[in-house]
Image (spheres, rainbow, N blue to C red):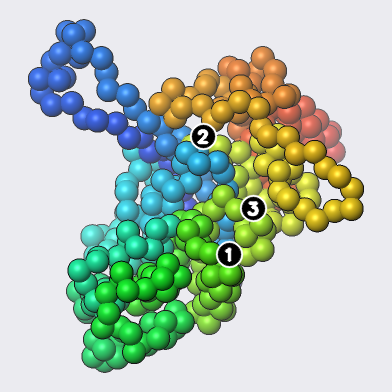
Amino acid sequence: MTETVAKTPIVELKNVSRRFGATPDLLGKALIRLGLSPTPPVVHAMDGVDLTIHRGEVVGLVGESGCGKSTLGRVVAGIIPPSDGEVIRHGREGMTRRDQASADLAIQMIFQNPMAALNPRMRIDDIVTEAPKTHGMLEGTRAEHADKYLRMAGFDPEMKFRFPHEFSGGQRQRVNIARALAVRPDFLVCDESVAALDVSIQAQVINLFMDLREKLGLTYLFVSHDLGVVEHISDRVVIMYLGRIVEEAPTEEIFSRPNHPYTQALLSEIPRIELTKRKFKVIDGELPSPIDPPPGCHFHPRCPFAMEKCRTTVPQKREIAPRHFSACHLNDDNIQTADATSTVAM
């Protein structure tokens, strides 16, 4: 890999937002204009997200349920388009339709529920080879192609003529992995892909992901609420809260020196084997509704350090240490002091 290729992001999100809401028909629009019907509620799933993922990285995406993690993963994978902003894949802007289709194939997604992600009326061999056949990517016969990628995912090819309901959750997830690998991607988005599995099976699947990374040079966006798993497999961790990225840093840095109050609260709840007793304290309050997110910093209603500025002004994500970014007004004075020192030095 050349230095130029290594520096080119495999995926780059620029100020990406995603909103969901019912679109009224013509009659509904007329009633809304006349004030006879309320405006349909809009869910703000993502709000001005900037994220860069480089080739070969494993990026862990963490946050509470409902914070927008899965939506971000689907936007990255090209399953749903952004409402605003720009998604650049493989460093190419303004791609043709053919280039866009190729980029979409190069990024595959593995979902949380392995049974729901498989067609119950199709046999395993057809599930794995359907996309390669459609896009002219078969290696040999369909049977040979299925055998190769099922074996790569740790699934016995002898069972490829059975249906998904005949297997356990771990086996089904291996089929999902084989299906993703069958189109030779270079980037996998794993959306809570081990959350529905037994703990022992989780370890096997995680080890499989790491082996595939070494063999195939894969890049991962690993979406999870399990901080222990993320700490184990990730090179970099991104913390998300109510549609916004509040902190990102290399894994060791974020687990040893968390900056954002939300990150600190999350990490304080990880069970640890320690000689001293610890008192676990949950984060105060509940996650606000993405239909009506709070103004300013979205975390301010639950933050013990909130000040007036937090209630009115959106904090900008800033580099507070090498490769460590945080979006918190508590850093504003430190950033300003550092900028002033730099100016004096010049």
Q: How far apart are marks 3 and 1 (CA)?
A: 14 Å
Q: Position of residue 21 (x, y in %)?
A: 29, 31
Q: Distance between the residues labelled 2 and 1?
A: 28 Å
User: Between disc 3 and disc 1, whose residue precedes?
Assistant: 1
Question: Which of the 4 image quadrants contains residue 239?
Answer: top right
Instruction: Identify the residue under disc 3.
Output: 227
User: Between disc 2 and disc 1, whose residue precedes?
Assistant: 1
Mark 2: secondary structure: loop
Point out the frontmost of discs 2 and 1.
1
Tell me if residue 166 comes above or below residue 328 in the rendering: below
Query: What amino acid is labelled 1 in the image?
Result: Val
Tell me if residue 152 comes above or below residue 29 in the rendering: below
Badge number at residue 199: 1
20 with respect to 265 (left or right): left
**In which quadrant will I find the C terminus?**
top right
Instruction: Identify the residue under disc 2.
Output: 242
User: Which residue does the image show at 55% across and 41% down from the upper left?
Assistant: 64
Q: Where is residue 136 in the image (x, y as percent from the top left)?
A: 22, 79
208 with respect to 93 (left or right): right
Query: What amino acid is labelled 2 in the image?
Result: Leu
